Structure formats: structure tokens, C-alpha cells
């Protein structure tokens, strides 16, 4: 019967003492704080994408009959 609502013509007071039978355990605290090491961001190599047929680089060539090849940017 989850998801069903019961409509009453007037509010019902007092509220019931037990709302749910479900009991949740309290989360346990971690024993020690996590160690966070700083690592400088890695420099990612820039790539261009070249098409052999028709010859050209993306975005100048929008559709390629062969798969685009990744070429390191200079």
C-alpha cells in the first residue's frame, strides 16, 4: 500500500505515537581523518583531429569517410 494517500474530511489530532516501525542505526564516526595529499594537476597534451578522406582537420572537416586520427598539437 506504499504510495497511497488517505484523505480525511478534517485533520486528525493527536498525531499517532508511532509513525514507522523502521529503525536506522546512527552512522559511526571515522577513527581518523583521511589523509589528503596535494598533487599538482597533470598537463594534458592538446590534440587535433585529422581526417584523411577528405583531407583536413576538425572542425573544418565536419564529416570524415575514415576515422579521425588524433594528432598532437604543436
Image (cartoon, helix red, strand yellow):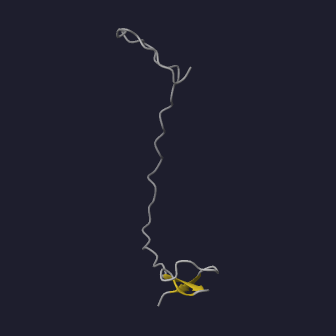
Quadrant for the N terminus in the image: top right
- Establish if 72 lies above or below 30: below
- Establish if 24 lies above or below 52: above
Q: Residue furthest right?
A: 66
Question: What is the x, y in percent for residue 43?
Answer: 45, 79
Question: What is the x, y in percent for residue 69?
Answer: 60, 83
* Total number of numbered discs in the rendering: 0
Question: What is the x, y in percent for residue 21?
Answer: 52, 19
Q: Residue drawn at (47%, 46%), measured in percent from left and top?
A: 30
Question: What is the x, y in percent for residue 3?
Answer: 51, 24
Q: Is residue 32 left or right of residue 66?
A: left
Using the image as rendered, state which of residue 29 and residue 7 is in the foreground. Answer: 7
Using the image as rendered, state which of residue 1 and residue 64 is in the foreground. Answer: 64
Q: Residue drawn at (58%, 84%), measured in percent from left and top?
A: 51
Using the image as rendered, state which of residue 37 and residue 4 is in the foreground. Answer: 4
Q: Residue drawn at (42%, 68%), measured in percent from left and top?
A: 38
Amino acid at each position: 500500500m506504499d504510495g497511497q494517500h488517505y484523505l480525511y474530511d478534517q485533520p486528525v489530532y493527536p498525531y499517532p505515537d508511532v509513525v514507522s516501525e523502521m529503525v536506522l542505526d546512527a552512522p559511526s564516526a571515522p577513527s581518523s581523518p583521511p589523509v589528503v595529499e596535494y598533487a599538482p594537476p597533470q598537463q594534458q597534451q592538446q590534440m587535433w583531429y585529422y581526417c584523411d578522406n577528405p583531407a583536413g582537420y576538425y572542425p573544418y572537416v565536419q564529416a570524415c569517410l575514415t576515422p579521425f586520427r588524433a594528432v598532437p598539437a604543436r
